[in-house]
Structure formats: C-alpha cells, structure tokens
Amino acid sequence: MKEKNGYTWLLCLLALASCVYILQDINHVHIVQALPIFMLIILLDLFPVRLPSGDEYSGGVTGFLILLLAYGLETAYFGIVFSTFFYYLKTSGWKLRRIPYFRMSCTIGMYTVCISVTSSVINHLSGASMYITSAVGALTFEIVNILLLAGIFTSVAGAKYFENIHFKLKELIVPLILCTTVVPHFIHHLETRQLVFETIYTAMFLTLIIFFSRAYLHQAQLRKRASEEFIRLCEVRQAKPSHGHGSRLGVFAEYVIDKTGYKGSGKNELVMSAILHDIGKVQIPPHILTKRGALSLSEEKEYQSHSEKGAETILHITGNKKVADWIRYHHERFDGKGYPSGLKGKEIPIESRIIALCNQLDYVLAEPVSDEAAYQKLLQQSGRVLDPVLVSQLEIEDIRYLRSRITYTVETEEAEEQEELVAESERGGFIGSTSLIRYKPDEALSGLTVPALADEIKLLAARAFETRQYFFELMKDNGRTFEVHFHPEPHEVSIIMSDITPAIQYRDTIHNNIMRSYKDVIETLSNSKVDICLSREEIQEQLGTYIASMEVKEKGDVAISRTFVAEHYPDQQDAKRLMHIKLAVSEGVTNLIKHAVGGRVSLYCKEDRMQILITDQGSGIPLHELPKTVLVSGYSSKRSLGKGFALMHASTDHVSLHTYSKGTSLLLEFNALMNGQGNASSYQPAG
C-alpha cells in the first residue's frame, strides 16, 4: 500500500507530458483571453458548494469544458495545471514547502486524461447542440474521473475497484446540471467584454449559491456545537486527558473524511458520531473513569460497556440504527481483538473504523513526541487496531497539520480548582496546595508560592517555551515534594504546581502496612527462615564485619561472583557447602541482572555466619508476588524471584529481603561449618 506505485507514476508522467505539450504549443494557449475563466475555476476550487450530505463540489469541470470548447485542448491543459496548483496551495495552508507535489502531479495527470478523452468524444458530436455537447462532455469527464480515482484507491490503498460506486454515480447529477446550464451560456458570449461581464455575473450567482448552501447547513453547525458542548460537560467527569476529546475527534473526522475519500451519504452524521462516540461513558461510574492504574476485571467489563450504552443512547435520540452501530463498534479492532462483538476487518463498519482512527490520532498527538514519532506510533497500529487502508492515506504532513489545528491544554479555573483541592485536602485527600504560575520570557514568575524553587522552575519553563512541548517534573524543597506541570501556550507557559507530599506519605504508609502483613505471613510459612525487612536500614543493622565486594553489570559477572564468594569461604574441601553457596549467589545475581541495570555483591562475617549481600537499583519486586515465591514451588513472573528464590531458600540458612520501587536488598546467610561433635566452629574468612 504505497502511494508511489506503477499506476501513480504513470499519472505523474502524463502530467509531465501535458506540461511539455503546453510549452511546445504555448502560442496556442489563450492565457489573456481566458483569464476570467481561469479566475472562475479558482473561485470554484477555493469556495466549493457544500451539499446537505456534507460533500463539497467545486465545479471545476465547468471551467475546463468552457476552456476546451472555446479555446482548445492546450488552454484546457493550462487551466488544469493552473487550478490544481492553487487547490493544493490552499489545502497546504498557502505554504509552498508543504505542497504534496507527487499527489498534485497525479491529480494533474488524472485530469489531463479526463479532458483528453472528453475532447475525443466531443469531436464526434459535430452538429450537435451546445447543450447536448456540454452534457455529454461533463458526463464523460466525470465518468473517466471516477474510474481513474478508483484505480488510485485500488493501487494505493487496496480498496475494491467499484467500492461505493452508487454514491459516486449519484454525484454525476450535479456536474450535469451545472455544465448544461452554464457552459452554453459562456460559449455564446466569447467577446472579451461580454465574457468578463458574464464571469462576474456567474461569480455573483455562485456566491449566492455558496452563501445559501452554508446558511442551509447553519442548523447542522448549531447541532454540532451543541453536541460538542454536551460531550464537554460529560467529559468533566473523566480524567483530565479526556477533556476536549470529543471536540478534537470532530476536527479529526472532518479531515480524515476528506483525506481518505469517504463517499458515504452521511458525512455530517459521521462527524457528529465522532464527537458523541463516548457518550455512553455518562452511564459509567465516575470512580472507574478517574481511576489511576489497572482496572479490575469487573471494572474493565463495566468500562467496555460504554460503547453499547452509547449506541443505545444515540438510537433513542435519533432513531437511526446505522449511526448507533457506528458508535457501538468504534472499539472493535481490525485484528478481531476488540469489543463488544469481536468483529474483524471489513466486518466493522467503515464509519466505525474512521472513528477508531480518529481516536488513535488523538492519543498519539496528545503525547509530547515529534511528528515523526507520532506518525510511527500510528503505523504500529495499522493492521492491528486500525484499518491499514485508512492509515495508508495519512502521512507525516497530515500529522503536522492536525497538530497545528489542535491545542492540548489543561482547562484551569484557577480559584474554583484551588478551593476544591483545599477542600479535598481537608477531607483527607492526597494532594496539598495547588498553585497556577505564569511564565513569560524576561519577566518574573507570577503566582509562585515556593521562592526557593524559582530558579529551577524558570529554567524549565524557558525550555518548555522554546520547545513548545508539555512535560512535568518532580521537585523537592524543605521536606516537601511538588509535581510541576509545564504547559506551553502561544505567549507564555502555564505552570501547575501541586504539593504531593501527602500522597507520598500515604503511599509509604500503605507500603509499610502491606509489608508488615507479608512479613508476618512469610516468616510463619518459612518457619522464620525468611525475614521481610521494612527498610533497607534493617538489613544494614544485621551486617557484621565487612570483607570485600564487587560490582555486577553483565551476564559474565554471574560466574565471576560465584568464584568471588567461593574464594572467601574458609573450608574449600566442603564441596557440598560450596555448591550451595555458589547456587544461591548465582540465582541472586542472575535475578539482579535480569531486572536491574546493575548492582553489587558484598561479603560480611558475623560471629559464626557468612553473609552475602546482593543489592540493586531496580524497580523492586511487587509485594503481591512475595508470598507466591515462598508458597508456590517453581512460581515465576516478570519480576518475582521465582524458582531462583526457591533455590536460595533451600540452600541458605537464613534470608533477609527488603524491596521497594528504588531497589532490592537480599541478604543470604550461611551458618559456620559443623565439626565432628556437632558443635559450630567459628567462621573465619579465607585469606
């Protein structure tokens, strides 16, 4: 599904051939005489008539036919090149560097074929009235255009050749009426002054049509705004990243509909569906929508029901089952792993697939990454979550353009939000005071309540202003921890600073309470052979005299650490004991390398015990995994000690463990050798 293939390259070559043809016969191009018609074509392209279905019709074929019948094929070619360039310049935001020149060339080549075939057909109508000639010319041009467009969608996107052909044939009535009415009138007024007058007259006439077409759709626009406001109020119940989600999807849907060549009859309905696609979340309990972290199975099931609840709501409002199904299936995946029905591929309505694409666009554009990275994230979903045909229609330039139209900001009502946060804190909430700080270059920070952090905040705010990227940072001052969010805006940076010290204290309290529970359970299950320490200091207090240590960084260090520990054991003749020590160390160090970037193995001796301390700076072992590593033989997970712990437990005389999000400390202890009388001899390290 590449845009550049044999078919599109052929169209580009035809465009080049038409340009060469124009240059060779430039004397036959009536630029001055046909200038009013060129202007009319540009007017039709820049200000198309909007139909009630949501389609736009530019009417450019009318101008092309006038040029062909009045001035010949060369002038018609020139008009095609001229108007196509202006059309792509407009859609690229009037910036030359953003024009997709390959696509523009394909369009020129396609219209060149259309006007050439039309010219050939008209030449066989000598003697026919101008009305018949205009009607046949318009019909020929549009039919060839439909066939060539179908070839593009088939070769580029893999679509069926005659997909949505009935919608395309219905659209033929518009150019037929327009050309049959306007073209003969123009041909009868070829004298320059009259042509200018007729062009102005027609332009005014078309202006009225455009005006009334937009006035006709005014009520639809009002409904759209009402829907956006309604869904915005619903999103207040959800987590902050969801605010404005529906309105943004409306913008994305309008763009994707035009970009992907969607030819359904309900474009306006599809845009409205994109805006209201999450309306079912109104019926979902608020705690599920705002919960941080993973949902339970029952919560996940409740959350997933929002698509069906939304479909039921839309069905009751509109009575349109087709539109309700678009919303019902917007979480289906192209690979069949979505919900609620597990539909796959083309089983999913194309409208639902478009809403899903818009959904993913909002997620990738919300992340503070480059346009290229956002585009790659979108490509990763192609064929899995998203329809690959739709994804193939988008490029990095589209990501860049959409990002320029959408602003992701935190909606802050300063006084109300702060009062709510204070009230929450008084009720035992987890967030302390929150303040809104404003940064403008070369000005002092306004609203700062922690002067000691002024320099650091100002430095990061300047970075956010320059890079135009959102980010947050944790800062500490006088025993307090702050979460500081930097939101770049056009002329300043808004900084949301929240005191999260209560949340951290609460987290630590919960962690310690859980650790105490697990400590009691595991010590009982292991007959006091395994000790769960609540802090790293507890392990440090158990250590005896320091002997030696080594760093551990890579897999090769596993064997080195075994040799290192064994060399310091006093009785080198006790092969069984040495094997147990090496095995325990090997498992401990292997786990360290697997789940952390590095650590250390340290040796200590205390009275009649050899102590081996293994530490790392990893992410810690999940607390809920600890009992399983003791209870279940051979249990293992992505971050448990698993089978390794079982081996260490069997090989050592005592194990002490402390784990936290900043690292794990594992203390393995071996009692001294027993002499022949069964008495413990004093441990003396080798060397």
Image: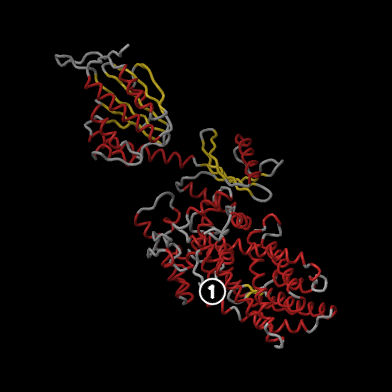
Please tell me whether residue 218 is drawn above or below residue 396 in the rendered image. Answer: below
- Which corner quadrant of the image does residue 670 belong to? top left
**Residue at the extreme right of the image, as rendered:** 193
Q: Nearer the viewer, residue 262 or 172?
A: 172
Q: Is residue 277 left or right of residue 573?
A: right
- How has the structure been colored for display? secondary structure
- Where residue 494 appears, x then y in whole percent? 62, 47
Numbered label tally: 1
Residue 13 visible in this rendered orientation of the protein: yes
Q: Is residue 667 left or right of residue 313?
A: left
Please tell me whether residue 292 is drawn above or below residue 302 in the rendered image. Answer: above
Q: Residue at x 63, y 78 (%)?
A: 140
Q: Nearer the viewer, residue 480 or 663?
A: 663
| Quadrant position of the C terminus in the picture | top left
Please tell me whether residue 188 is drawn above or below residue 495 in the rendered image. Answer: below
Name the amino acid type tagged 1. Gly
- Which corner quadrant of the image does residue 46 belong to? bottom right
> Which residue matches tag 1?
266
User: Badge 1: few (under 14), some or many (20 or more) residues near its Cα, within 10 Å?
Assistant: some
- Where residue 245 appears, x then y in whole percent? 53, 59
**Residue at the extreme left of the image, as rendered:** 677
The residue tagged with tag 1: helix, strand or loop? loop
- Where residue 423 appears, x then y in whole percent? 50, 50
Q: Nearer the viewer, residue 197 or 352?
A: 197
- Where residue 614 appears, x then y in whole percent? 36, 27
Residue 250 visible in this rendered orientation of the protein: no
